Amino acid sequence: MSARRTALLALTITAALPVSYLHAGSHTLEETVVTASRFEEAKALVPANVSIINRPQIAQSSATNVPELLRSESGLFISDITGNGRSYRVDLRGFGATGGSNTLVLVDGRRINAPDLSGTDWSLIPLDRVARIEIIRGGGAAVLYGENASGGVINIITQPGEETKRTLKLSGGSYNSGDVSLTWSGSTERTQYALQMRYATSDGYRDNSDSESRDLGINLTHAVADNALVHLKAGIHRDDTGLPGSLRESQLATMDRTAAANANDYSETADGYLHITPEIDLNEAINLSSDLSMRRRNVHSYATFTGGSFDGETRMDMLGFAPRLKWNGHLAHHLNRLILGGDLEYAKSRIHNNSSFFGNTTLGNYRMRKRSLGLFVQNRLSIRDNLHLDAGYRYSQARYGFDPGTPGTTTMRANSYSVGLRHALDDKTSLFARYDRSFRFPLLDEMFNFFTNTIDSNLKAQHANTMELGLNHRFIPELGMDLTLFNIDTSNEIYFDPNLFSNRNMDGEVRRSGVELTLKRDWQQGGISLGYTYLRARLRHGLYDGNKLPTPPEHKANLRGHWQFDQGLRLTGDLQVVGKRGFEGDYKGEIGEQGGHFVANMGLRYPLWDKRVNLMVDIKNITNNHYADYLAMGTFPTERGYMPAPTRHLTVGLSSTF
């Protein structure tokens, strides 16, 4: 069957099996978000492109982890950078190789982006523990949260306690994969609790892509008074994972795509956190809240590369304190909401490594630290009942320390600001416009040269200016559209130069212009969602003037759907179409582009034994397409590199709530 016919078949199948989205999730005042202001508010008041994935939508999806769930969201580009589902790059609005450093990821409002190049560890967040996900596109979140938010912010909210119930899930499938999880939740008069445990293992699609993980998480909420709550959330994660590495084009010509480029590379991770949030309503107008968090992460990894190897252990400790105040009142007879807050963060990294580089062996012991301070103010003035003006400002400072290092310390400062306007024309149509300035400080190991034990004092903070126009419209109550146009101009963009083996500021500017479109149609038994993203990313001025930013595709489309039949049978489907892309690191455009690809997935849910047990069947890549999720330019010699994605694979499982 030709690729065109296969694509048409997948599109037809998926269109016939739509994914249901609650109409209120996109278009009504009743749905609320917490990410846009760090307090709960109506989504329809936020002057930004906001998406919410709620628990029913998660249950309807065939995704097995959070990045897979996010693939179908407009403006998001997802890459499996190890090829075994262990490590993902989630990139909002096409920052490419540094997408993980420009997309802020929160869990219950707590930052989980690591302050070094390890980025976000998506395996820390089992999907069964997720209650909802809020996605706010654009740099406006930088005022509230600081660095790493130039592309936007993703806030993953875990499940709170509810009525007493226990849910057991068992599944297995291709590549000798197995997964077992238990969730136990309940409540008393003043306390809610939820406990989740999970164990997962798989041999992986490729050689040396096996993985084994263990997770334990707990959520507690206690009402200490009628006007005061304390939330406690904690989690522990362990995993052992093989790292197969990317295959060069010359290797793919002689080796099977399941082969490992590096047969002995691996990573072992231990991660744990504690997060406490007290909040109190002082009166009807004033609310006080704060986040206190601590996290420890240990990673032992071994990796080989052209000319050498690296065996290292990293221990990272992170502390955070984030107080904030919300005041609701009137300003010149207009409703007004004011938020004041701050962020104090401390991160310390201890690295012990043994590296070999072209025959030279080096033993290294390094200590790196970063102290961050942020102060912010955000205000919303309701000019009229249907016209709301948002404005905000943030001052941020980061002080770095390195031992050994020359010099031993350095300090950076940045200012962020934003202004946005939301206007509801009527009960069907709403418009928004906004301007934001965001920033990114260098990561710890972007500033430090491990070969010379020196700080790159020339590396500067990155800044981005973003403009957006958006439209939300309901054609009929069951059919809605969200459309956003955006432009991002980034100066001093931080990137890794593969020719110099160092991190640098781009000597020109990067301009990203794009369109994000989402259409959703609901029926009583299901629904369908269609998304499209256009992104034009160009390097302007400087060494690479006029070239494309290599990795994000210009075109991306997604379709997903769900349909509920009689007797409880539910079918789901999703299709992602990704346009042609360049190879990471190829800023000169020397090795061309890889053609586009599509991936179609299907799922089945069916109740058994008087609905006491649910059967789950998921088929991924149903057309058995051969493609690579992650593309990079290899050096020594310069050559295309691929991370082959799994072909067709199956998962079957059972779940029971009792």
Image (tube, rainbow, N blue to C red):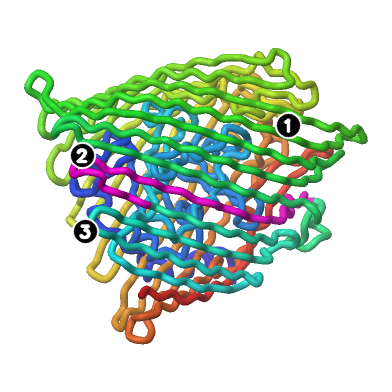
Mark 3 vs mark 1, CA separation in Å = 50 Å
Mark 2: few/some/many CA within 10 Å (<14, 14-19, 20+): many
Q: Nearer the viewer, residue 619 or 318?
A: 318
Q: Residue at x 32, y 62 (%)?
A: 186
Relative to 281, is 417 on the left or the right?
right
Q: Is residue 172 magenta?
A: no
Which residue is situated farthest in the bottom direction here?
Answer: 609
Q: Position of residue 204 (x, y in %)?
A: 67, 64
Which disc number belongs to residue 478?
Answer: 3
| Quarter of image, res 317 | top right
Which disc number belongs to residue 498?
Answer: 1
Answer yes or no: is residue 93 visible: no
Give amino acid for label 2. Answer: Ser
Relative to 366, is 217 on the left or the right?
left
Which disc number belongs to residue 302?
Answer: none
What is the tally of numbered marks visible in this picture?
A: 3
Give amino acid for label 1. Answer: Pro
Mark 2 vs mark 1, CA separation in Å = 45 Å
Residue picked out by circle 2 = 430
Give amino acid for label 3. Answer: Glu
Magenta residues?
220-249
Mark 2 vs mark 3, CA separation in Å = 16 Å
